Structure formats: structure tokens, C-alpha cells
Image: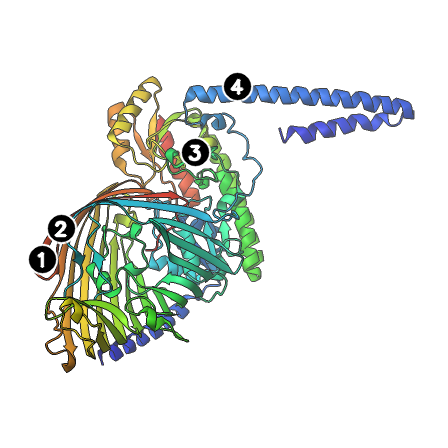
Amino acid sequence: MQRTLPAAVVAALLCIAPSTRASETDARLEIERLRTEFEQRLRQLQEDYEKRLRALEARSERVGDTGLSARTADATGAPAVPTASTPSGTGFNPEISLILQGSYQQRKDLAERGLSGFLGAGHEHGSERGFRLDHSELVMQANVDTNFRAYLNAALVDGQAEVEEAWFQTLGLGQGMSVKGGRFYSRLGYLNTQHPHAWDFADAPLMYRAQFGERFSHDGLQLSWVAPTETYLELGAEAGRGDRFPGSSGGGNRNGAGAWTLFAKLGGDIGESHSWRAGIAQLSARPLARPGHWEDDAGVETEVAWSGLSRTWVADFIWKWAPDGNPVERNFKLQGEYFRRREGGDLSCIDNTAAGGACAGVSDRYDSTQSGWYAQAVYQFMPRWRTGMRYDRLDSGSQALGPGFAGVLSTTDFRPSRWSLMADYSPSEYARLRVQFARDRSQLGLTENQITLQYQMSLGSHGAHRF
Amino acid sequence: MNIQKCMQCLLVTVCALWGLGVSAAQAALQVLACEPEWAALVGELAGDRAQVVSATNARQDPHRIEARPSLIAAARRADLVVCTGADLETGWLPLLQRESGNARILPGQPGYFEAAAAVRLIERPAVLDRVLGDVHAAGNPHVHTDPRNVALIAKALAQRLGEIDPAGATIYADRHRTFAARWAEASARWQRQAQPLRGLPVVVYHRNWSYLAEWLGLRVVADLEPKPGIEPSARDLERLIEQLRAQPARMVLRAPYQSPRASDWIAQRSGMPVVMLPYTVGGTATARDLFELFDDTLRRLLAAAQ
């Protein structure tokens, strides 16, 4: 059609050309006649084409619902005029995605859950067994302008919305440099940057619970640099408010930074089937009156507050295998992380004598060096199906209480551990159903068998995941 | 003490890697191609002037690749990234572009070339709903299986190479002229050879043969995938056998990265042969460049059609 139209116009013009030599009125009449004739022909042509198109469409419907054959029918001609395609994700509206997750959890009925021997990153109240709706994640992201990209991840829970991440990132610095600002998951370790929907197990490793509660995020700035090398090397530094464990809200109330991170990551491929990444990071924080729970020597719960310097080293390693680098059929993933935390500072005990406790506002030194690790392997043995195993271990290490706490508080020497087995089924890359069994020995004198059934549904334009 | 040693180790490693990286960056132009066909095309147009790395090989599904550390490192050094676009690499390319900190290869920059933008896309879905499977909003991205598309893309790419590396612009233009002439000649030959294939009814695994089918006039009567990107289950295949009884096909087409299981099963039950086409450069031992890719594709189709 696009080809025949100009031809018709040229033909019409050629017809017009000789007639202009006649008298003006004649010419006008002639033009008028030609115009109507031209319009008639055009209409005929249009009808003719529409008829042929309808016939082709009908034929393609008969052939099958693949819708391919209508196009193949006229395949002898050259391809049509190229048209620019719209690049993805450049609409003015942000890319929006929603992740819905929920679970059924079979657990013992405990009043309080914690990690014995660790002055924990908070404690979970044991009310969350049975059916439960987990965080619904709402993610929006877009390029702000030519210089910045911004991202928001909000976790919706009953009655509140927590801002998990809300940051901007530079786009155009070049030279491998990138600056991120706002609230973001720290790049330390491997699992720390992953949202729960990207985890391979239903819960975070014990190591993460001991270190950060679940993960560490900064309200601050991140600077990172990718080296121009054949082997992947990235170096980075982060500075933030430091109001989250191992920092504290008191420690965040200051000019300057309350927490810092340094990280280095190295990675590459071995042949076509193997790829790996290793990293090391250090996190420092200066918490002020960081709250915690402790059972005193009279067996009564007391609230404690700790101030000092906390320094954590985290090493991580991940190795992935897929035959010929094609993970669709089968793939294997091995990952492990190790942390070691040294803390030195003062612990003060909030008076609980009224409740029958022995802790009467004592303050003295509390120093500790603690560590932990986990290793996990996940194998996709056929499309859609994966299975995995994880082992967690923590070491309460050396803890030293100042003499002021004699007869009031004492330390627990304990090595929490846990075995987890999981199997999951993903009918598509947007949906996942999982069953997990765990044997948990993270609390002194308690062995618990935990069963978790979980679903994760991802709606909308889901962004790509990191390696 | 240990920590200090660690840091020293790290520093030495960084310096060593830096040295390696500098020595590697000798060629005029560093190019990262998302798929082997574009790596081959850059090779045709730029010759020794560009050092090309392909992010994927022929046995990898370009939809399903991870943003591996090695790819981030390659993206970091690239002056030009040549990809298909049209959402084919949506699961990994955006990460490479952002995480590498390389401003030259961001969308909209001259250093990012999208092949799909140079051609007309077919099978643009009227409705976007994931109930229809892994649909591509922009249309079918497997454009390189039609040599006429390759010719259009080559022209656009040669021009882009000249923009990015003006010193070599005449070289790219010359090489493109030679390539275009050879390609036109080969295309005419392929067109002649493919005459017997016109109207041939075929079954495909995924819609990655639509442009090939359009070019050769193959009639695609069924897909093995019940919906794009969804692997067929036993029940889907049973249903397909029923459908093929009413509407028989001559062969099943599959790419090297697609599992042979489903196509072999269908072939056994229906008596059709499975034809593994190279799909891209490196897909078979003989498909070592773009010309051999189409030579081999036609050879295999004609052999199966006899």
C-alpha cells in the first residue's frame, strides 16, 4: 500500500501535466475530473486491499491460532520500512512491581525467640506461627533524568509501610564510578543486598539474625568503583547514620556518620559453565545505649543498654554452575559467608529489682568477639524444580563482663546451629512455592523442628536480579 | 595483624589486575555483544579494529542469563554494547549497564546499539498479560534469523561504529560495502536454494523462528511451548499430538539451547524429524560465521524436507 500510493500520485501528476497547456477553464475542469477519478481509484485500491487483508486474516485463523501465517503469505517481498522500537522501561511512569508473599509456619509456642549467647539484634516475639501474611513489597523505579536513577521498595504490613530502600544512584559519572544516596541495603556480604523474595530459603541465615536482625541498611551514601580489568573487581565505601543494629538510634544522633562500610568484591568465570564471586567487607558502628535483653542471675529478664565500638568483618563466596552456562534445565549454586564481630564498650543494666531481679542499674565493661557462618547449596535438577540444603553455625566466642556485674549478670557460652532443607517449585519465573524443613538449635536447651510452607508471587515489571 | 596482611594482599591483587586490564585494552574499540550473531557482525564490519566479546554463546538462552561478574567487568571496559533489544535481554542487560558504572553504554547513548531498532518487529502483542506467558511488549526479538534484517542492521551498525570511532569511519564504511555486496549475493543464493521450502508446515519449540519462517515462507502450525517462555508439560505435548493429527507438520525446529527432550518426544510420537538449526553463530560446528549460519540452516532444512 505504501508503495502503490506514491506511484498513483506520480501517475496522476503525469496526467495533469499535458492538460495545463489547454485554456484555463478547460484545465480547471480537467483537474477536477482527474481529481475525482484519482479519488475513485484510490478508494477502489483501498477497498481492494482491505478485502485482501480480510481474506488473509481469515486464512490465518483457519490455519491456527499462532497468527504467523498471515505474515508468511507475503514473504517474498523485502521487509517493510524499518520503524524505531521503543526501548524498554523508558516510559515516564516508573516501573512498578509488587511482590506478595505469605507462609504457613509450624513452630513451638515460645514466648520469646532469640539467639542464646548473643546480645541480639533485637528479638522476635514468638507469635508468628500458623498461617501468616509476610511483607508485601511494592517496588517502583525509574530514571529521574539523564543523571540519576531512583528506586523505592516499601514493605507493606498491617497498619504500616516500612521503607526498606529508597535511594538515588548516579548514571553518568563514568570511569566505573557510581554514587548512591538515601536508604539502601549495604553491599557487605552476599545475601545482604537481596530482598526476601530472592532468598533461596524461607528465612535468613542465623548469621544475619545475629549480626543485623535481618540485614544491614544505611541511611547515607555509597561510593563504588568497578575496575577496568578482565577479572571483575569492585571497591566501595559507605557511610551512614548508623541507627540500626549493630548501631543504635542513639548512635545515629550525631553530626557525621554513625556507621561505615568498606567492601571489595572479586569475580569471574572459569570456562563457560562456572562463575564465582568472592567478597570481603568491614562494618564499623558506634552505638549509643543500644537496647538489648538479658536474663539476670536471678532468672529475671532485664533490659540492658550498650555503648561502644562494634567492628564486623564479613567474607562471602558464591559459586554457580550450569552446563554450558545455560541454567534453564539444570544449575547449581554454592554459597557461604563468615562473619567475625569484635565489640568493646560499656553495658548498663536497667534496674529490674522491682520485678524481683538482681540487676540494680549496674554499669561496667562488656567486650565480646563472636563469629558465625553458614553454607548452603541449591540444585535445580529439572526445569521449575529446585532443592537445597543449608547449615548455620554461630559461636558466642569470648565475652567478658566487667567485675561490676559479678553476681548480677553472667554470659552464656553457646553455639547455636541449624540444619535446613528446602524444595521449591516455580511454574514460571514470577511465581514460587516452597516447602522447608529446619532443625533449629539456636536457643539453649531447645531443639525445634520447624516446617514452613511459603509462596511468592511477583507482579508487574520485575527488575533483573543481581548475580 | 591478619587483617593488615589481608589488606596488603588485596592491594597487590588490585595492582596486578590493573596491569592486566591495561594490557588487555589495546585494540581501538572494545565491544561487548549480547549475542554471538552480533559479535560476528561486528567482526565483519570492524575486523581487527575492534576487540569483541560475546556475553552469551549459542548454547545459552539469551532470555535467561545472569548478570555475572565477568559480564559486569566486560561492560565496564566496553566502548560499545551491541544487543538485540526489544526486551530480549531485560533480565540482565540493565544490570550490566548500571552496575558497570560505564556511562557510555547506557540506553540512549551512542555506545548502546539496539539491533531491533533497525528493523520491523513482528508479533507485537495486542494484549500485555502474563497469563499469555513471557510476552515481549515490543514484538518478537529474534530478528537475526531473517538475512534481510541482518542487512539492515549491518548498515545501521556500520554507521554507529563510525560515529563512535570517527578515525576508523572509512574502514567501517568500506568493510560494510564489501559485506553488503557479499551478503546480497549470498541472500539471492539462499532465496533460490530455499524455493522447495515454501509453504512447508513446521512445528517450532519457541517463537524464535518466526522471522526465518517469514523469510522462507515456512508455515508454523504449532509451538511446543504452550505459552512463550513456558516449558511444555506432558499434558501440553499430548494435546499437541492431537492437534498435529488434524494438521500435520513436516518437522520440528529447535535451537541448540533448547532442551531436546520435548521435541524428541513429539518426533517419536508423530514420526516427524527434529531439525536442530544452528540459530546463531557457533550453534553447530559448521556455522562459524554469519554466512555459514544461513548456509548450514538451509542445508539442514532442505535435507529434512526431502
What residue is disc 4 on?
A: A55
Q: Which residue is at the far top?
A: B246
Mark closer to the chain start, 2 or 1: 2
Q: Which residue is at the far front?
A: A354
The x and y percentages for residue B207 are 39, 35
Q: Distance between the residues labelled 4 and 1?
A: 75 Å
The circle drawn on residue A108 is 2
Tags 2 and 1 in contact by the CB under 8 Å rule? yes
For the residue pair B271 and A350, the one nearer the viewer reads as A350
Mark closer to the chain start, 4 or 1: 4
The x and y percentages for residue A391 are 15, 57
Please determine if labels 2 and 4 lie on a single subunit.
Answer: yes
What residue is disc 3 on?
A: B210
- For the image shown, how many numbered marks are present on the structure? 4
Chain containing mark 3: B
Q: Which residue is at the far right?
A: A23
Could you classify mark 3 by the number of other residues whose Cα lies within 10 Å: few (under 14), some (14-19), or many (20 or more)? Answer: many
